[in-house]
Image (cartoon, coloured by chain):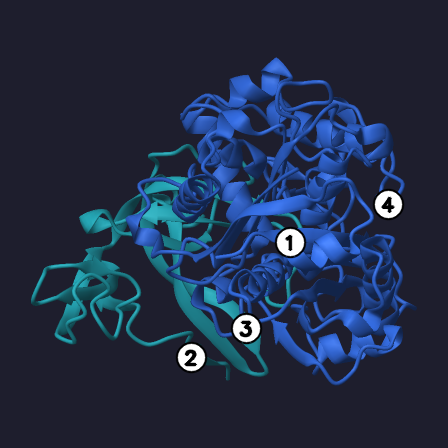
Chain colours: A cyan, B blue
Amino acid sequence: MTQTVTLREGLYREGSEGPILTGGRCSRCGFIGFPRPQTCLECGSDALESADLGSRGELLCETTVHMRTDKYAAGYSVGYVTMAHGVRVFGQVRKPDATSLAAGESMTVEVARMWEEGDKEVLCYCFRPTAAAAGGAA
Amino acid sequence: MKPVVILGVGQSPFGKFPGRSIAALGGAAARAAVADAGIQPSQLQIAYSSRLYADMITGQTVLKEIGVTRIEMVNVENACAGGATAVRSLYKDIAAGYCDVGIALGVESMTTSPIAGKLIPPAKDDLDGQLGMSMPVMFALQAKRLMETHGATAGDFAQVSVKAHEFGAVNPMAQYRKRFTVEEVLGSRMIADPITLLQCCPNTDGAAAVVLCSPEFAARHSGRRSDVQIRASVLVSGDYAYKKPDLTSMELGTRAARLAYEQAGIGPEDLDVVELHDAFASEELVHYEDLGLCKRGEAVSLLRSGATSIGGRIPVNPSGGLLSLGHPLSASGVRNICEIAQQLRGEAGERQVPGAKVGLAQMLGGVATGLETGAATIHIMAI
């Protein structure tokens, strides 16, 4: 039986309608960053709490990489998605086909397998076009 | 601060030489730079050496090849800006009067590095790196934004590469030494859309070195009527990426340029020639604007006007750049300073920019989650 592990704790949480990205909010100055920093990047305060960045964002840009890496087969896509509070997040983009996505496309956060290590599947957040995510199968 | 003179420059051939050791590559560059300086290796007082895919004591390993031992040697790393960081470090020592003459070198054997033939990744525990970030991805995403915000086309990006190879074809030290058409560049294998193979710098083994000295030392040892001086030397690190409104300008590049022009007491309109980081063709457009070679938003029209090509108002990367000359990571920041020095001396052969008196060499380096990029260096030189 394959075990699953999360790439890194604290990047997302399960909401009632799917995963929600979580960053950090400074309780002193209100700065919001992702991933949640140990210390506020604006004011230096240590008082950071978890802040939801939502389950949907807007695509800034994405690219499809045609060379394999240690972890990914050729043909994987990655990009930046602007989440709630204007936070720009890098991640994998899982597309239904090879067609490029336009800036501004609505993207939904999912949790998916990134790679396998032995009998473990490593999971992390990724983004899927909301239109495709709503269709379910893509 | 005292002025600093570039007394000697040298580089090894650039190419794929998996059989050549770091000592052999670096030694060739160091030997050439010392010979060009017209001094004995034993006169060197300090050495800064840079290498990204490092083993221990790069400088000592290289300089023993030319008979240099015992002196203070420092080994530095700053990704692709590492070589220029070594030059900057030596510059400060001489400008401050700690020493009179020293050598800075960068060396890299990419074909024997752990990332040979791979996309250059961030550190192995970096979050974005684990999710698929790499150098070509960073610049492909920037290129996508340039298409949205600047109306840049795939053909424009290809034209940057065509231009680099036009120059590189006449540089005897270049790896490619071959011209390509826009169609050939666009038709080469896709790496990370819209970046194709011929819009990426190749994997390169090579080294470059400079000998810097004080004006007093130059007066005693230089055989030249006039020597190239460093008028500005700037090294800055990157700020948090969240502060960037978009990907189409690099804040640290803009900041480094402003500091360098202030130091040199000149503006971008005074430059005759520029060497910059063109690891990926599309990024050159961003650097045009960040260096002030044109106004914001006008990089595409600057390229299309031919101003940065052979015979243009401000030729960029007459060496062939990283795209054609090749990119041994830590060597490139030294090598592009060497190129500007050769251009200002009028010793650049077929690729000479006629009458060049003031030039700028820029490098960038590094990627890590949360940062815009790692480092930017700018050196302004004049004769």
Judging from the image, what secondary structure is the residue with disc 3 in? loop
Q: Nearer the viewer, residue B234 or A114?
A: B234
Disc marking residue B205: none
Tell me residue A53's x, y (percent). Answer: 21, 56
Q: Amino acid at mark 3?
A: Lys
Report the amino acid beneath label 2.
Val
Q: Nearer the viewer, mark 1 or mark 4?
A: 1
Per the rendering, the mark at residue B173 is: 4
Three-letter code, disc 1: Pro
Query: Which of the chains bears the disc numbered 2?
Result: A
Position of residue B330 in the picture relative to residue B126 (left or right)? right
**Residue at mark 2 to residue at mark 4: CA–CA distance:** 50 Å
Residue at mark 2 shares a chain with residue at mark 3: no
**Label 4 secondary element:** loop
Callout 1: SS: helix
Q: Which residue corresponds to the image point at 41% horizontal and 45% vertical from the top-left?
A: B259
Closer-to-camera residue (A93/A112): A93
The residue that label 3 is drawn on is B124
Label 2 with label 4: CB-CB less than 8 Å: no
Question: As drawn, which residue projects farthest toward the top?
Answer: B305
Q: In the figure, is residue B231 to the left or right of B116?
A: left
Which dot, 4 or 3, sits closer to the camera? Answer: 4
Mark closest to the chain's N terminus, 1 or 4:
4
Q: Position of residue B233 (x, y in %)?
A: 52, 51
The residue under label 2 is A5
